[in-house]
């Protein structure tokens, strides 16, 4: 999305007049260049500047609570390797945990949608587990699984498990009745129905769950790192060590890195969703 | 009480003393009571009647989507479940029921990839349509239904009428012995409906499958059918069966003629007398 692309686009459109304008042209209703209009970016820029000024003012008044932005920045710059290493550890735990939670939730969702008895047995328990705060369970899991990576994977996986389970289970059962009737008159097998009809129907529900669960997996990993006081790495560990030593710039720099990581994960989900769900209304917002 | 027509050979569809009750105790409603219907192969039969007369229930029972509480159902001499297993039944529901993530072409070809053992089972059922070895050319069927341009589009990019046409092509693509259609045009505007009726007749003229067509439109029933079966509610039952003796192919000119309107009046009259006996 450079300026050069913008210049070439109208020329290309000029050769075939009836074609709708390129998405890189500002005339396209959903132009990918819309963000270069000040009305698109200015509000956010002004808001960020305002927050930065407020922060600096707060840092001067309350030096023990807020470090100045410059110190956070210099900590990030001088110890970039430290932050990247720990971020990768946390990210690895989060994504691996998410993958485990996803696999387990998907299998259970399929089983419960195919076996109503199992659904009635499992779903109430799943709902109760889902409303139990995981932060409360985390220390017990650390005791159970030790200080290695395992409790982090388990906690990240658990926190992702229930939103995925409930969403996919709902999605698999939300096939319109008339669609089911059409394929029942062809005597489609359960596996055929599942693969050709139910799973694709559940995809929008799955992506809704992934949007929730990708950021949550980081929460799970950080909570696990903080609960396991003997952990050696990860941003959660970095935050608890730094705050115990009153190194506020390191704490806030770590938080900033976590936030950026969450945004990047969300971006990945959104991009994949646009690809996979191009047929669905939600992809055209 | 008898919707039978003269039969030679195994009828395409046969219902004997069919009874279907929904609910229990005092709130139970008799959706169908003592329904007798015989449809010879190749006929176009419409079920018409006010809502609650059990016409959709009858259709679901014929298509094997529901079991009767009493009585017997046979499709080409076998139970509906067996007919479904042999892919002898094509269903066109009220809504198009297309899969929104598949293009029109993939929507209508998906049935060929489902239940592949059906062809073998079908050979063993006497009297079913000879289907040949190769599946029908769905592209050609789509073109004939006016969906040539829309073949690679997603259902959401099509109008309601085009979506319903795709649903009809999907059902015809099965080369079904019995095509069951549940008010397939009721959600469409009048112009679209008439053009779809014409296209349906075109396809049917060629494939000569048996059609069971549920509708609440008198002119639609007369226009399309060989036989119009009139039904009445509480309990749902068949009150009359009227053969429509009009030449085919039926073209626009016919629908302005007196004999067409006489059939319409006849069906309306029977519907009304069913109502009146109801009120008495």
Image (cartoon, rainbow, N blue to C red):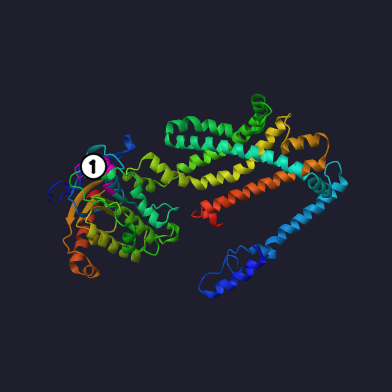
**Residue at 65% over, 49% down:** A264
User: Does residue B230 appear to the left or right of A232 in the view shown?
Assistant: left
Stretch in magenta: B73-89
Chain ID for label 1?
Answer: B
User: Does residue A251 appear to the left or right of B87 in the view shown?
Assistant: right
Could you tell me which secondary element the residue under label 1 belongs to? Answer: strand
User: Does residue B205 appear to the left or right of A40 in the view shown?
Assistant: left
Q: Could you tell me residue B199's position as x and y percent?
A: 29, 63
Q: Is residue B61 something that shows in the picture?
A: no
Q: Could you tell me residue A205's position as x and y percent?
A: 52, 45
Q: Could you tell me residue B110's position as x and y percent?
A: 37, 50
Query: Mark 1 — residue?
Result: B33
Q: Could you tell me residue B195's position as x and y percent?
A: 31, 65
How many numbered discs sit on the rendered protein?
1
- Residue B120 falls in image quadrant: top left
> Label 1 crowding class (10 Å Cα cut-off): few <14, some 14-19, many 20+?
many
Pick whichever, B190 or B121, lies toward us: B121
Q: Is residue B119 something that shows in the picture?
A: yes
**Extreme top residue here?**
A144
**Residue at 18% over, 53% down:** B241
């Amino acid at each position: 999305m450079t300026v050069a692309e913008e210049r070439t686009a109208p020329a290309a459109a000029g050769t075939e007049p009836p074609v709708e304008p390129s998405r890189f042209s500002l005339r396209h209703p959903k132009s990918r260049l819309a963000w270069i209009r000040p009305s698109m970016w200015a509000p956010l820029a002004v808001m960020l500047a305002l927050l930065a000024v407020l922060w600096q003012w707060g840092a001067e008044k309350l030096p023990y609570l807020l470090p100045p932005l410059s110190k956070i920045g210099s900590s990030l710059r001088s110890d970039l390797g430290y932050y990247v290493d720990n971020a990768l550890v946390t990210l690895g735990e989060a994504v691996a945990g998410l993958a485990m939670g996803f696999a387990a939730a998907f299998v259970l969702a399929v089983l419960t949608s195919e076996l109503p008895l199992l659904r009635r047995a499992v779903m109430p328990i799943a709902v109760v587990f889902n409303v139990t705060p995981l932060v409360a369970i985390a220390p017990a899991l650390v005791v159970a699984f030790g200080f290695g990576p395992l409790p982090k994977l388990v906690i990240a996986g658990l926190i992702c498990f229930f939103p995925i389970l409930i969403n996919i289970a709902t999605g698999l059962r939300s096939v319109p009745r008339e669609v089911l009737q059409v394929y029942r008159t062809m005597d489609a097998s359960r596996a055929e129905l599942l693969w050709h009809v139910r799973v694709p129907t559940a995809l929008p529900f799955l992506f809704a769950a992934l949007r929730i669960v990708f950021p949550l997996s980081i929460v799970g990993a950080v909570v696990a790192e903080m609960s396991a006081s003997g952990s050696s790495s990860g941003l959660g560990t970095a935050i608890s060590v730094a705050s115990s030593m009153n190194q506020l710039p390191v704490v806030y720099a770590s938080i900033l890195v976590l936030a950026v990581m969450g945004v990047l994960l969300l971006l990945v989900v959104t991009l994949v969703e646009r690809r996979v769900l191009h047929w669905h209304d939600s992809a055209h917002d | 009480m008898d919707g039978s027509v003269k039969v030679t050979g195994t009828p395409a569809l046969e219902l004997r003393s069919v009874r279907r009750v929904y609910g229990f105790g005092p709130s139970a409603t008799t959706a169908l009571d003592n329904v007798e219907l015989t449809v010879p192969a190749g006929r176009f039969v419409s079920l018409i009647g006010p809502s609650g007369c059990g016409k959709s229930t009858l259709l679901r029972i014929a298509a094997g989507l529901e079991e009767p509480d009493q009585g017997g159902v046979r499709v080409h001499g076998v139970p509906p479940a067996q007919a479904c297993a042999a892919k002898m039944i094509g269903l066109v529901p009220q809504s198009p029921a297309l899969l929104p993530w598949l293009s029109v072409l993939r929507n209508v070809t998906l049935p060929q990839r489902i239940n592949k053992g059906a062809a073998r089972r079908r050979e063993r059922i006497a009297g079913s349509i000879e289907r040949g070895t190769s599946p029908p050319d769905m592209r050609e069927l789509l073109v004939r239904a006016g969906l040539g341009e829309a073949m690679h589009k997603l259902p959401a990019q099509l109008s309601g009428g085009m979506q319903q046409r795709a649903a009809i092509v999907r059902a015809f693509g099965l080369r079904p012995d019995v095509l069951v259609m549940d008010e397939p045009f009721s959600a469409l505007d009048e112009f679209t409906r008439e053009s779809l009726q014409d296209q349906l007749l075109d396809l049917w003229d060629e494939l000569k499958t048996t059609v069971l067509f549920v509708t609440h439109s008198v002119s639609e029933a007369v226009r399309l059918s060989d036989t119009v079966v009139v039904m009445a509610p509480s309990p749902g039952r068949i009150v009359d069966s009227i053969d429509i003796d009009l030449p085919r192919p039926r073209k626009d000119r016919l629908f302005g003629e007196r004999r067409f309107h006489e059939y319409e009046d006849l069906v309306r009259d029977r519907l009304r007398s069913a109502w009146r006996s109801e009120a008495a």
